[in-house]
Structure formats: structure tokens, C-alpha cells
Image (cartoon, rainbow, N blue to C red):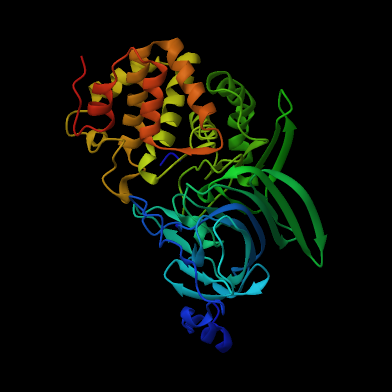
Amino acid sequence: MPRSVPVVRTALALAVLLPLALTGCDGGVHGTPGGYGLHDPYFPRAGDGGYDVAHYGLTLAYDPARHLLTGTAVITARATQDLSAFDLDLKGLQVRSVDVAGEGAAFQRAGQELTVRPHHDLDRGETFRTTVRYAGAPETLTDPDGSKEGWLRTADGALALGEPVGSMAWFPGDDHPSDKAAYDIAVTVPKDLQAVSNGELASTATAAGRTTYRWHEAEPMASYLATVAIGRFTVSRSTLKGGLPLYTAVDPTQAAASRAALAELPGILDWEQRVFGPYPFSSAGAIVDRPKDAGYALETQTRPVFPGAPDTRTLVHELAHQWYGDSVTPATWQDMWLNEGFATYAEWLWDEDHGGPTAQQTFDRLYDDASADDPVWSFPPGRPSDAAHISDRPVYARGAMVLHKIRQTVGDVAFLGILRGWAAAHRHGNASTAQFTAYVEQQAPGDDFGAIWRDWLYGDGRPAHP
């Protein structure tokens, strides 16, 4: 990312207000509630302890004229402890019912928390299925930095964006990057509209004036990388060298302006595979739309979103995220530089390989032009000051500078090995900054990285640079 009801029926209101303690298992409670949030350094309420999601099955219907979203979320998860209750993240919307393992479950709402108490306690290691039926007017959320996410209306439909916690505006889940899962997303819209999402389009079916688009994403995906784009699109399908399917959906008003940049997409992917290693997913592409409230691109998995016609460097950046951010996903939001520093450095490498300045020249110009009070030095990339600054310039530019300092230390050949090896070692997983620094030190045991970690990654102010 180069950068957020109808009135509840009386019976439902009573069910929501009913104390959860009254609905415990008749045989006695042996489990405990899952943790309230995962205590992320910047979004402590996001996610929930006590379970790990394997799959989301989302069945959605959206009526743009009424701004009404109706959904059923089937969440398959494994209990990581004995559970008497657990939380899902859901902001707004009206919950109509919750089932766990086929039985009705009590539930309660408090802010973004949907607390569910199953009819029977769940045992550690047990796989269970939770079904949440919900409806309402999905919200556009405002991030701590003032940007918009969640459910964003467009001229002819809507666009769902989730970084960092916007997915809870349109489906219930464990909304933290550390819990990745496979997704099946079915979206029903008026037949004159289309619905685009992550992964591969499995089927379409039209009946009674509405069309259902079914999308399948088999590889693990963090909730913030899920997307749905609803509207009128010019769709292009092709197959890249090696058999990778490519699917692009472009708002017709942006088609002419996007044509030249999108024509470079196959070449960019080919170059990035040579630099970063094999592409980590089973499909690729892009969505070019016109959200009313979002002016940023986002690396939504397999199909990055652009708020208007992209340029080449933005394509390079968002596609690099498919390796760094989407496949290797940060363990917490404090590790955001592992996304943005890598994607920014991908732009430097692209320029270096395509007739532009070398990465060294880009580094030197950035350092020389940024005086001691420049915002790029306002905090270290490994420790953003707070949630409002995880997408600020130090995370991007100074994060890229950390990578260049590593390259200077180990040399070009070893550095390329680190880029590729890091992507391979944590493919489809999560990783922290501590894991990255340990990995670099293991790959180059004869080099001293202490000053890089101390001054460039975690140090305050403008580091000394010979």
C-alpha cells in the first residue's frame, strides 16, 4: 500500500442482551473464554486468542441502490485451548443468528467484538464450524491516520479494503494478520454489475435478475488482504509464461489511462520472479476502480487494487507485496516495514535494472536531501510511534534504506540470496522483524550487522552515513 442498520427485532435484541453465563454447557464448564484481542502493539483489540481459522466461506449479496449487504460467514477453525467462548471481529451490521457445530449459540456485541458462546464447550485441538448470518449497511471506517477503509462506495457499486482492520466492516473473523486462512467468496449482485475478488473465478450464475460470482483463494490469506469490488468492469484474461492465469478488472472510465501500465504487468511479474523467486500464488492480476473515499493502492492478494490508473512504479510496488506482505505476512503491525520497506526497495531495484538511477544513487539522494528534521527520520522503521504512523514515510523509505545497508554489507550476490531465501523460508506464513534480523545474520555469519540494527532499523534520528 503506497500510502475504513436495520433495527434489531425484539427477539434478537433479547438474545443479544441475555447474559452469556446463562447458556453454558449443562455438563459444567471446563473451558475458558478466548483472549480479548491478540494484544497487537498497535491494534490490541484485533483478533482473538483461542482458535486458528483454516477457512472462510463467505456468501454475500449486495444491493447498491439500498446500500444493503446480506451475508453468511461459515468459519472453520481449530481450538488452540479449551474454549467456553470466543470472539470474532465485526463492526456494525446486524447479526441475525450464530451457530457453532450446527447448534444455536448465544452471542453478544460490544464495539467490534462479537462474542460467541457455543452450546457445548470446545476442546483444545477440536475443529469446529461457526456460521454467522448478518445484514445491514456496511460502514466505511476511518483509520488512526485518517485514511478510509472497510466498505467504500463507488460510482456504480462498492469496494472492500481491509488494511489494517477494515475487513471487520463486511465479514466477521479473526481480523489480525497472524491468522491466515483459505477463502471462498460468493457475491450476488444485480445482473448488470460484476463482482471481483481474490484468487480464481470458479463460476458465475444468473437468476431472477441477479448474478452470483464465486471466487476461490486456496493459499493462506490474511483478512486485511481480502477484497471485493462490485461495479462495471472491463475484464481481461490471459495466461502468462509458465501458465499463470492473469485476470484484470478495470473501471471503463479508467481503461484508456490504464492500458499502457497494465500492458507491463506480465513483464513486471517476470522480472520480480527472477529477483524474488517463484510467484507465490496460483493467479495474478489487478483491479482498477474509483472509490469515493480511498486514494491509495493496496496489495490485496493476487489482485492489487488501484484507485484509478496506476503508473509502472506503483505496479512494481504492489506486485512485490505478493511476496513481501501477502505470502510472507507480518507477525504484528509493528513489523509493517517488512511489507513496505521491501516493496519500496523493489522500486529502487526496478529503476536500477531499467535505465534509471541505481539503488545506491537513490539511497544517496534520499539521505542527502533529508535534513535531520526531515519526516523520514521521525521514528525508526522497526518501531513506529503509534498506529497512526505505521504507513508513514520512515516505514517505506527508511525501511528500504535498511535493506540497502544490508546489501552494502553482504554484496549483491549474497543480498539477492537473502531476498529470495527470506521469501522462500516464510512462504505463506508470518514473520517478525526479530526473525528477519536473525535470518540475515545466519546467511552472512561473518558480517557485523549490529550498527545497521541499532542505527538504521531501531535508532532515533538521522543515522551517521560515511
Res 331 → quadrant? top left
| Left or right of residue 120, residue 464 in this image | left
Tell how many labels.
0
Residue 328 vs 177, above or below: the answer is above
Most foreground residue, 457 or 316: 457
Quadrant position of the C terminus in the picture: top left
| Left or right of residue 338, residue 424 in this image | right
Measuring from the top left, give residue 285's x and y in whole percent.
64, 37
Inspect this view and state whether residue 92 appears: no
Inspect this view and state whether residue 445 appears: yes
Q: Residue furthest bottom?
A: 10
Most foreground residue, 414 or 160: 414
Measuring from the top left, give residue 281's x and y in whole percent.
63, 35
Measuring from the top left, give residue 432's x and y in whole percent.
40, 37
Residue 359 vs 129, above or below: the answer is above
Residue located at (76% from left, 59% from top): 211
Residue 115 vs 433, above or below: the answer is below
Residue located at (61% from left, 46% from top): 253
Most foreground residue, 185 or 123: 123
Measuring from the top left, give residue 240's x and y in whole percent.
71, 27
Residue located at (38% from left, 39% from top): 335
| Left or right of residue 326, residue 229 in this image | right
